[in-house]
Amino acid sequence: MTTSAPAAAAGPAAPAPAAPLWRSRNFLLLWGGQTVGELGARISGVAVPLLAATTLHASVFQISLLSFLGWLPYLLFSLPAGILADRVDQRKLMIVCDLARMALMLSLPLAALLWELRLWYLYLVVGVCGVFTVLFNVAYKSMLPRLAGPDRLVDANAKIVMSQEFAELIGPTVSGLLIGLVGTARTFFSNGLAFLVSAVTLALLREAPRPAAAEASDGGGRAGLRAEMSEGLAFIRSRPILLAILACTATSNFFVIAKSSIEVTFLVRELHASSLAVGLVFSVSAVGGLAVGAVASRLSRRIGTARIIWVAMAVPGPLYALMPLATPGWGLLTYGFGLAAFSANVGLYNIAATSYQQQVTPAHLLGRVNAAFMWICLGVIPIGALFGGALGSGLGLRTTLWICVLGTWSAALFVVFSPLRTMRDMPAEGTSSP
């Protein structure tokens, strides 16, 4: 999630309308690198828990700890990452993060080849990789609005979501095939390659330098740092709609990651799915998000660019029940269809909510508001991962899935009963908003 500015009148004159995104070299480079990076992330999303479950024989709770460690950096580092992203060259920061993640991913197959791979080392790699992912994502979400321009935010965000869903469509299947062909550990060579491609595309990107607004901060002592970190939170608190979006996203993320932390285990141990079948299930799920991404701009115009935020959260909810209702064999597809409904919700909601944030946040606060959202919305994820693992161990996997899908749908209440319900469209750029 990210943002743009209410006080545009006080800033520099608005630039002339930009060329279509398809003709923007910088956006295409960012988009292309992100697409490859997302593909690598989806491959590891299946390979990491499978490596723990099969090769390292981890328990349900030990596997859920991987999700916990992967997301914990959002809770610990998001706010300082926002300050860093507002101060440094965001493109160079993203390149450093890509190269660091490449090295970490390549260390897994090398560790397996040179000595016996241990669970503690997998935990270490996942946790440190998560730190660089936080830095990358804060910088990326802050840079995207500048590359796309304010009048193309919905289109740009829709294209990014399409890339994510395309990666979700083919990434898990590719992961399943690679695991079958070369083994789970060697599959991580593909992740290293994906991060390298992303770093190269960013190196080729030529962006105009940002105004050095961030350097105006007094950046000295702890009081200054604390004040800077709180600026993003203070801005969100002053906007009821942003608060509602924050609460909705955080609640949804909590239950979604609780589900995700036991998902592969449920498919393998309850539904007796092979690694290839697990990959196919996640690929089926991506169809919903991919389809929504392709029509998001038209759908937003028809339903309303603000109204669609709560519609996207509320309408697909009943279909989530298909996941805990899944059975072995062809019933695996039921799980995929339930995931597809959720994927459609995530795609449409994220496009609309992110574009709203970008529309109402001042440019000089963009990194810190992004970081504040990440701190809360993604900071709940490690807690959700532990919740899912503990609940799965105590109540059973299927019962836990029921709790998680109902909890995910309940998140819609925050945006349904918010000022969004009385709005059709987002405010025009430069106007204030609730």
Image: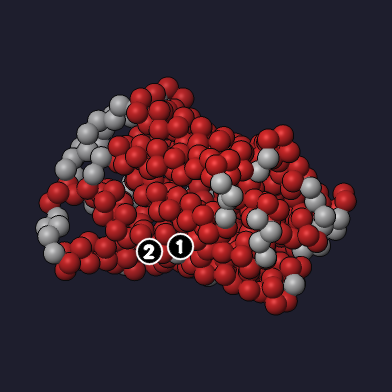
Judge from the rendering whether residue 116 lies leftward or rightward of residue 379; answer left or right. right
Q: Which residue is mark 2?
A: 76
Residue 287 sits in quarter = top right
Q: Amino acid at mark 1?
A: Leu
x and y percent of residue 94 in the render? 36, 40
| Colouring convention used in this rendered image of the protein | secondary structure
Q: Residue at x 40, y 42 (%)?
A: 100
Residue 259 sits in quarter = bottom right
| The C terminus, quarter of image | bottom left
State whether residue 104 appears in this view.
yes
Q: Residue at x 71, y 44 (%)?
A: 279
Crowdedness of circle 2 by 10 Å Cα count: few (<14), some, many (20+)?
Answer: some
Judge from the rendering whether residue 97 lies leftward or rightward of residue 307; answer left or right. left
Q: Nearer the viewer, residue 88 or 213?
A: 88
Secondary structure beneath dot 2 equals: helix
Q: Residue at x 67, y 65 (%)?
A: 59
Q: Residue at x 58, y 44 (%)?
A: 112
Task: State whether residue 141 is above or below residue 370.
Answer: above
x and y percent of residue 226 in the render? 22, 67
Q: Nearer the viewer, residue 205 or 28?
A: 205
> In this view, which residue lies farthest toward the right?
329
x and y percent of residue 105 in the render? 50, 43
Q: Nearer the viewer, residue 302 or 109?
A: 109
Q: Which residue is mark 1?
A: 72
Q: Amino acid at mark 2?
A: Leu
Q: Nearer the viewer, residue 112 or 60?
A: 112
Crowdedness of circle 1 by 10 Å Cα count: few (<14), some, many (20+)?
Answer: many
